Image: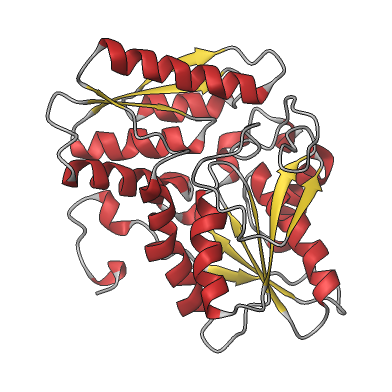
Amino acid sequence: MSVENKVCNTILEAMGHTPMIRLNRMVDADSADVLVKFEGLNVGGSIKTRTAFAMIEAAEQKGLLHKDSIIVEPTSGNQGVGIALVAAVKGYKSIIIMPDSVSEERRKLVQNYGAEVVLVHDAGDIGACIMECAATAKRMAEENPNVYVPQQFENPANVMAHHTQTAKEILAQTEGIVIDGYCSGIGTGGTITGVGEVLKTANPNMEIWAIEPEHAAILSGGIIGTHIQMGIGDGLIPAILNQHIYDNVVIVTDEEALQTAKDLARLEGLMCGISSGTNVAAALKMAKKLGKGKTVVTILPDTAERYFSTALFE
């Protein structure tokens, strides 16, 4: 039964089933069609609610959580919002450890769901900062047996959320359409791995691109610094990333990501975040490469409303 035809017992029952939207004004006439899955309309405003729910549910099924558990997660943003939301619904205390370079809105959203925020200084190397966030979470777990750390960069439930939800929704929404290309920014690696594996099974001849910010291009052997494409480019190679699933790695600059995110609002009416600009900037390049008659899919991971304090609204 669809959500609109029933009463949800909790907000979590309304999760997922986000729309797939064809881009019109941003795509050249001689390019492939570009379809975007808008996760900004998901519960919690991002794709990460799916993975937060999946990881917490998996921990419950394994008996790793109890009424006094404290869920602690190091994250560069949206996963923290998702964890805080799911913890709020299920009655767990949560602590989110974040770089101090994330947007102010992300911090406030996490706090408004009742979670505690611990900030770690980003001194110009996002990879080192994320590693320190992870080390802080590990120390908390060592000091308190009630602490549970989902470890999104390592947790297979992260990938499974996209196998069983996101990718299946994409295939259902594009029934009768051959997906020739898919591209995704890399944060935890969960989205590109989970969605990519399912789509590649459906069409082994499709092309998949991994996307990195210019200043966190670890897969490309580039420099690791600080960038504004929050949620991807954490300056490390995640354990759950399937490095065989993608055919190419492309780099997107902060300027490209920002301008594309602004264009999505002004030309397509899609008010989405900076990493959505990242994904679409790459998707438009892929669409030009593949050409007319083909179809490229990507994801808009979150909504623009958590970026008011950033360059997206300057």
Location of residue 44 in the rendering, given as x and y in whole percent from the top left corner: 41, 45
Tell me if residue 170 comes above or below residue 79 in the rendering.
Answer: below
Q: Tell me residue 117's x, y (percent).
A: 42, 18
Tell me if I can see residue 117 in this picture. Answer: no
Q: In the drawing, does residue 31 fall left or right of residue 113?
A: right
**Residue that sits furthest to the bottom in the current view:** 176
The single residue placed furthest to the front in the displayed view is: 244
- The colour scheme of the drawn protein is secondary structure
As drawn, the residue found furthest toward the left would be 67
Q: How many numbered circles does the render carry?
A: 0
Q: Residue at x 30, y 18 (%)?
A: 141
Q: Residue at x 21, y 68 (%)?
A: 6
Residue 91 vertical placement versus 133 (above, below): below
Image x and y of residue 202, in percent? 53, 79
Residue 53 vs residue 285: left or right?
left
In this rendering, the answer to whether 32 lies above or below 43 is below
Pick the front one: 280 or 75: 75
Q: Which quadrant: the C terminus?
A: top right
What residue lies at 30% left-to-right and 69% top-to-bottom? 4
Asked whether, in this view, residue 174 is left or right of residue 4, the answer is right
Q: Please state the horizontal and vertical placement of residue 218, each as a whole percent of the image.
A: 72, 37
- Name the residue: 77% across, 43% down: 220
Rendered-image quadrant of the N terminus: bottom left
Asked if one can make out residue 301 in the rendered structure from this viewpoint, the answer is yes
Q: Nearer the viewer, residue 59 or 270?
A: 59
